[in-house]
Amino acid sequence: ENAPVTVIGLGLMGQALSRAFLKAGHPTTVWNRTPTKAKPLVAEGAQVAPTINDALKAAPLTIVCLTDYEAVHELLGGSDIDLDGTTLVNLTSGTSAQARQAAQWIEQRGARYLDGAIMAAPPAIGTAEAVILHSGPQRDFEASKPTLDALGMITHLGADHGLASLYDVAGLAMMWSVLNAWLQGTALLQTAGVDATTFAPFAQQIATGVAEWLPGYAEQIADNAFPAEVSALETDARAMAHLIDETKAAGINTELPTLIKKMADRSISAGHGKEQYPVLIEEFTHPSDN
Ligand code: NDP
């Protein structure tokens, strides 16, 4: 017996979420501001609720996926909306502060609230490739998990409602940094006639190799001790100077190499040149002065 579920918001993502529930055999009720977007889902077995309150009443669990948190508040914040007794799972993207604030007003209205962040594109929803992060009370997560499992790889990060959004942006910071580093290398090699496809397998090897250092480096950060086991920061800084020289000589953009060296130089000035790279965490944990 699959539990019924409601989906509010049928944009590209909300439609994919609804389809995954239908495919997994959950009786699915949908609602969208623009009603025409529900039509293809009805053909696939969804029920359309005439009003938001009907949608909320149709299932104990309601998934919300709108453009942003302002839209969520605009849609569900009105006193005519009956949230009492509902469990809301908000998969709208936003900041951790917005998630905590949403938790507060939604819980005040008598609902249980889980926040969530989707780290996948709509076509991956419903497969193990779709990583979906949740945060909020453990017991509410456990009660919702059998239904949420239809969406992908479901993970609970902790009781703090802001955690899903924070992990989301931390993941994006990783993603953009790796991509920017790869683009920098590609731009550099292109000046010597090496094309992107030739560099890509090498770049992939480097990215994978570096990724393997992370757990060990994390232990140095956890221990707040950075012995130079493989390389001292001042050795890295000398190679950073070569990177800057090469990008200048190639006549390409030097912003990223300059930033990388600027942070290392500051750490060296503070006396950390003989320590290992992760000592730079201190540069990242302080506010920047610009
Ligand atoms: P869309 O633009 O396709 O859909 C937006 C949805 O929000 C629509 O259902 C729209 O209704 C609704 N909406 C917006 N404002 C209001 C409002 N004031 N009142 C009622 N409904 C409103 O966006 P997506 O579906 O792609 O994205 C939804 C969320 O999912 C976003 O937070 C996004 O960041 C997140 N996400 C999306 C991914 C993607 O690849 N698409 C990946 C990961 C996360 P209407 O149809 O009436 O306009």
Image: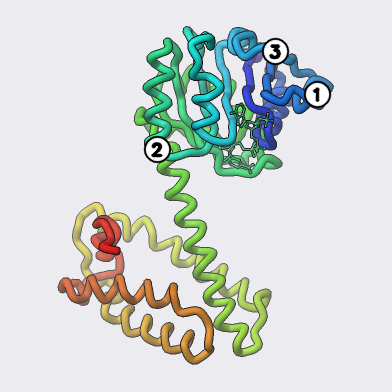
Q: Residue at x 69, y 33 (%)?
A: 16
**Residue pointed to by mark 1:** 39
Q: Please report whichever mark, 2 or 3, sits nearer to the chain's N-terminal start.
A: 3
Q: Earlier in the sequence, mark 3 or mark 1?
A: 1
Residue 228 location (% of width, % of height): 24, 72
Type of amino acid under label 2 = Ser
Indicate the quadrant of ligand 1 in the picture.
Answer: top right
Q: Is residue 113 visible?
A: yes
Pointer 3 residue Cβ closer than 8 Å to ligand 1: no
Front residue of this view, candidates 197 and 220: 197
Q: Quadrant of residue 213?
A: bottom left
Q: What is the crowding at mark 1: few (fewer than 14 residues within 10 Å), some, or many (at least 20)?
A: few
- Circle 2 residue: 96
Judged left or right of residue 93, residue 26 is right
Disc 2 element:
helix
Q: Amino acid at mark 3?
A: Ala
